Image (cartoon, coloured by chain):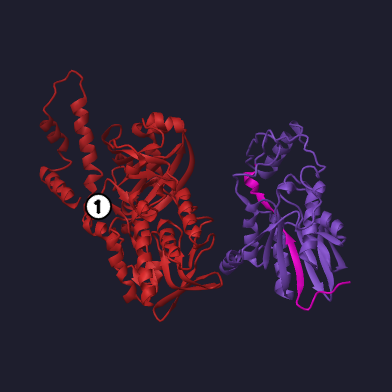
Chain colours: A purple, B red
Amino acid sequence: MSMPEPSGLRMVVCIKQVPKAEQLKIDPVKKTLVREGVESEINPSDLHALEMALQLKDKHGGSLLALSMGPPRFIQALETAIGMGADEGILLSDRALGGSDTLPTSYALSKAVEHLGHFDIVFCGEETTDSSTGHVGPGMAANLDLPQLTYVVEVEIRDGHVRAKRAVEDGFEVWETTLPLVITVNHGCNHPREPTLLGKIKARTIGVIDDLNADDVGLDKDKIGLSGSPTVVDKIETVELPDRSGRIYSGEAREAVRKLLDDLEAEGII
Amino acid sequence: MDRFDVIVIGAGPAGSSAAYSLAKEGFSVLIIERGKFPGSKNVYGGRIYTYPLKRLFPEDWREAPVERYVVQENISMLSKDTAVTIQYDSLRTGSSRVNSFTAIRSKFDKWLAKRAGEEGAMVISGTRVDDLLVSNGTVFGVRAGGDEVKANVIIAADGVASIFAQKAGIRPELIPKEISVGVKETIKLTKKRIEDRFNVGEKEGVANAYIGQVTNFLRGGGFLYTNEDSVSLGVVVQSEDLSSHRTEIQELMERFKLHPSIQKYIEGGKVVEYSAHMIPELGTCMIPRPFANGFLAVGDAAGFVLSHGYTYQGVDLAILSGMAAAETVKAARAANDYSAGSLSRYLHDLRSFGVLSELEEFGNAPSFLMNPRIYSAYPQLLCGILNRMYTVDGTKKEKMFHIAKEEMKGKISLMQLMKDLLGGTRSM
């Protein structure tokens, strides 16, 4: 069992930059998300992970590193993370990683984490809004051979023990385990702070480390990119939303409800 | 890092020009922009005069995101369904001789801020400055959230409603009389449609001004500028007139779009942006002393806008005032004195960059332009006279003087007409 060092917790949070949800477009030919020319943001549950880590840092001290994998424009997300309070931002960027699905992504991020040193907690968001798999956090835990707690809404560290509350379908579970571990953070569990002016100035002054590549972290080229990705997108269908009809039932409540029930029944809805 | 040589509040044309000029001279400069990116909060009807850009970027001003170079200017006086238009064609060719161009401010401002960034200025967006740090009457920094950042000079480039010029005590709060309200729509057409409908070539465009019915004869006017594949169409009205006549500017805008002389241009177009903005009322907003201890105001924040009635200058004066402010700060650094006394040479620098001389020379134009008859009686009169002159329907034609006299009856006296004519020529 490893104890947090006296200097506090060493944490890393993995973040991804995703197209803004309301701007999602799908390339009809390539069947992939259009990522160029649309506004992007930090994946929302990654922001919650960042906030959870920052709260631990506020309480216990220590260091927080923000890690991302993607093209150079992801620097923006890492600058935001530093602006919010992360100590450093590191971007793993390599053309060979292009087209990676969740398997090589988990592999590459794990290798990057190993390369960057020892961490008490590896944070991820529960899933990304641009693919919604939720694979990467658990995938990293498997690669790093660490315990994992997923869909966490609250976390507490006491005497080297981690106590976490995780959201399950019909309620919450409380688990206890030891450091180090991987935590994936549930969407909406906290209010991510805004980057501060001094934080943004710091981000610009220290800059994001953006020259980490596949060789640096020792990636096996066969395991990454399109060739290392077993997922095949067979077909993408866009859903046409049906027209909605509005109807107002007025008059006495009992009568109106009866009429509504009759109509619903007549249309075969109930 | 919580100390810079200079902090600029606002990354519009004035702020970015000041930051660019200072960063180029080796100053450490922080620009703080409230919008998500420079230009994101900007509304713009679209025309920029080239001369200050040529001065700021002598080598490569043409890299500016130009929509179209203005080759034709029109002023139209509108009645309900007629228009009298004066058309001016600039027949010179070659973009180097071009006097102005249309631009989309969100693109233009972004570009200008990028230039400042490339010179080494630190551009921070998405942060609102809450307050100035002031001690013993000297401004020495800014506060944003819980953070304080200090500098020798703070340059306020925060636009027409500049709260920082107010906080620094060099400008009173705006009163409605001093501002106009503008709305603008960007209407998407196609490149080809623009070139067909306005009869212009590639990269060529028009700048149109409208008075009369467009504002329902209130003080103000309308404008239309051609962008690459859209038009910027807007209405600006004196805010006092709006409230005293209980008029909604959106309604004026809707009616403007239905006017036959506008309809033909925008038909089949799609509104892709709608925005509203305050515009400082010409002349009355200029701050006599746009400096304080450790503090300068530039652009709209200092009231540097100018209208001759047929042109509207703001962006160009903003750029020049930003360049002038940079000169002032350079001199202050050389003297190691950032007091109001030292920064007062800003007035001198504004004059040598041509900002004040223009504003001083045309100081009378605003009061003349406040004359309500320009916006109501005259457009109606002109349209009425020409309508009668050109209507041929078999009835007996009258002499022009007679028509004019009849049209004027009850609307305006000959004396008044002479007086206004004289006043107008003198002040312009």
The magenta span reads: A1-24
B19 on left or right of B396: right
Image quarter where the N terminus of chain B lies is: bottom right
Image coordinates for residue A218, horizontal then vertical, percent = 79, 56
* Residue A185 in view here: no
B178 drawn magenta? no
A15 drawn magenta? yes
- Towards the viewer: A133 or B183: A133
* Residue A148 in view here: yes
Instruction: Name the secondary structure under disc 1.
Output: loop
Q: Quadrant of residue B214?
A: top left
Examine the rendered structure and indicate whether residue A215 appears above or below residue B376.
below
- Residue located farthest toward the top when viewing the structure as drawn: B394
Question: What residue do we see at 77% from left, 43% from top?
Answer: A226
Q: Badge 1 local density, few (<14 within 10 Å), some, or many (20+)? A: some
Q: Quadrant of residue B413?
A: top left
Look at label 1 and name its amino acid: Met
Question: Label 1 belongs to which residue?
Answer: B370
Image coordinates for residue B39, horizontal then vertical, percent = 47, 53
